[in-house]
Amino acid sequence: MPTEPTPAKATPTEPTPTEPRTTRAADAPQDQGAMPHRHVMLVYFGLLFAMLMATLDSSIVATALPTVVGDLGGLSSIGWVSAAYILASSAVMPLAGKLGDLLGRKQVFVVATVVFLAGSAACGAAQTMGQLIAFRVLQGVGAGGVMAAMFALTGDLFGPRERAKYQGYSAGVFALSAVGGPIAGGFFADHVTWRWVFYVNLPIGAIALTLVALYLRSARRPERPTIDYLGMLLLSGALVSFVLLSNWAGAKYAWGSAVIVGLAVGGVVLLAGWLVVERSAAEPVIPLGLFRDSTFDICNVVAFVGGLTGFGLVFFLPLYLQISAGASATNSGLLLLPMMLGLMLASFGVGGAVAKSGRYKWYPVASMLVSGIAAFLMSTMTADTSRFLSGLYMFLLGVGAGLSQQVVVVAVQNAAPPADMGAATSTVTFSRMLGTSFGVSIFATVLTDRLTREIPKYVPGEAARGLIGSGGTSPQALRQLPDDVRHGLAQAYAHALSPVFLIAGFVLVAGLVASVFLKDITLEQRGWGAEEPPETPNATARPAPQSS
């Protein structure tokens, strides 16, 4: 799709003379000629199908895992079925964003979708747990490329104001996959076969691939771009180290263990090496000049905080609902619907408001404020809190997440030079994913530590020692416990989760302070999604982003 010509006036994100940059193929328009509005919308629907496919696979597997283990064995490796996918997609995303800038986003999208579909077919045909994990890595590589190209292509398809509206629809698809994934996984496992958890991607991906391949115009690159292989290798190593650190610390290994310390040190060393290499790279993976723009920096902070708190807490709300509130596993998923509803309503509302006014500054501020209020309210929940109140608090948390989820992407795309839009977009998306991983790890450590103190307070006698550190708190095991033990355990979990929500609230206060300093910029209005095509002879031109 078309990208903006390089503005004549330098923006804060452009590289300085101290960082040499060569003339890039990416400076040429992504696509040639005006696209009819109908084709624009067909491509966008293809991108939505791709997002549904990629995000669905991060949640659909969870409820089918017991059936998978029963068929393939390998119980000790069960955690890697999800971790391999998340690790691969997280590490690939920033690299795919840069490759899209250099080689063309359509090309990256098509290749990534084919890789994802090949991985899906292979996962469905896996005969051992080792094969399944290996094919999940392949799937994750494709998913990272799909997500990076999808967000950047949405930025190409629509003008700055319209991006907020259409990114809001993307957030709705994300919420749909988060809720529908576990339900669909359970259905396939119970009524068809767990293999359809992966085969279901094939028709969805085929639709996405067909629409984008047929209707998205792509320009031929006038020259062979320079690819920063060393920078990509160093950044990939650093990202893998940090993602493993965030997933293992406090869960599989103690925070002070040699493995965790080694990952931390290794990640820092690799990151430092990457920074040194990028200063002289002709085509840095993430141009360091982007970090000179406060909009880029603040949006990454807001995305990280939003992922750490909003999506990080999602992993712990089912524990409260099942153990403290007494809901079944199925009902606990349904009780999360208020949060997803709040997210969708806020995303759609903010998207329309930004498209109309062109202003976005105060939505991230409101996001941090509303999410912080929700987190502090959730810290007051006990085993006796009504379903209405807990649902209201979760609704507020969803609203808070929806107020900024797509806005930070739009703000970064507006601030970045056109040729670096893919790198900038994938960076802020990765920041949210990394925040989610760290949130889960940190909150799990806090919860585990608090449970060792709270269970003896509320569970009588010898039963407390048997429950601390045991696996006897599954919904099935809870039903087998005596009433007094079950009630005490419910109270213990409610009190142990309270500091988790409280910590999230204080992190959101820090995010609120950072978001206040976001620049107040008016977005341009005209874009490719408009009914009327651009009036200029070169239809790929769009007004340069404003800066302040």
Image (cartoon, helix red, strand yellow):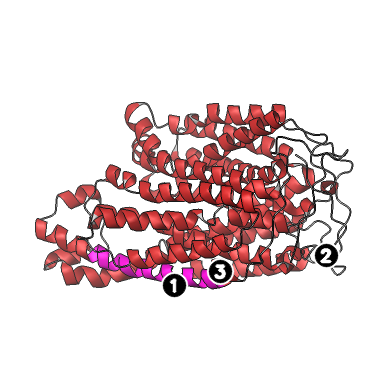
Front position among marks 3 and 1: 1
Q: Is residue 121 left or right of residue 295?
A: left
Disc 2: which residue: 280
Q: Which residue occupies the foreground of this view, 43 or 19?
A: 43
Q: Please tell me in which quadrant of the rendered image residue 526 appears.
A: top right
How many numbered marks appear? 3
Q: Residues within 10 Å of mark 3 (few under 14, many from 20)?
A: some
**In terms of sequence position, does the residue under pointer 2 or pointer 1 come before the other?**
2
Distance from Cα at disc 3 to Cα at disc 1: 24 Å
Q: Is residue 522 left or right of residue 249?
A: right
Magenta region: which residues? Answer: 492-513
CB-based contact (under 8 Å), mark 2 and mark 1: no
**In terms of sequence position, does the residue under pointer 2 or pointer 3 come before the other?**
3
CB-based contact (under 8 Å), mark 3 and mark 1: no
Under circle 1, the secondary element is helix
Q: Amino acid at mark 1?
A: Phe
Under circle 2, the secondary element is loop
Disc 1: which residue: 506
Residue 430 coordinates in the image, percent (x, y):
59, 55
**In terms of sequence position, does the residue under pointer 3 or pointer 1 come before the other?**
3
Q: Is residue 160 left or right of residue 138?
A: right
Does 297 sit above or below residue 387? below
Does 447 sit above or below residue 102? below
Q: Please tell me in which quadrant of the rendered image residue 290 appears.
A: bottom right
Instruction: Determine the main secondary structure of the stretch shown in magenta.
Output: helix
Q: Amino acid at mark 2?
A: Ser
Disc 3: which residue: 264
Distance from Cα at disc 2 to Cα at disc 3: 26 Å
Residue 206 coordinates in the image, percent (x, y):
59, 27
Front position among marks 2 and 1: 1
Residue 521 coordinates in the image, percent (x, y):
69, 61
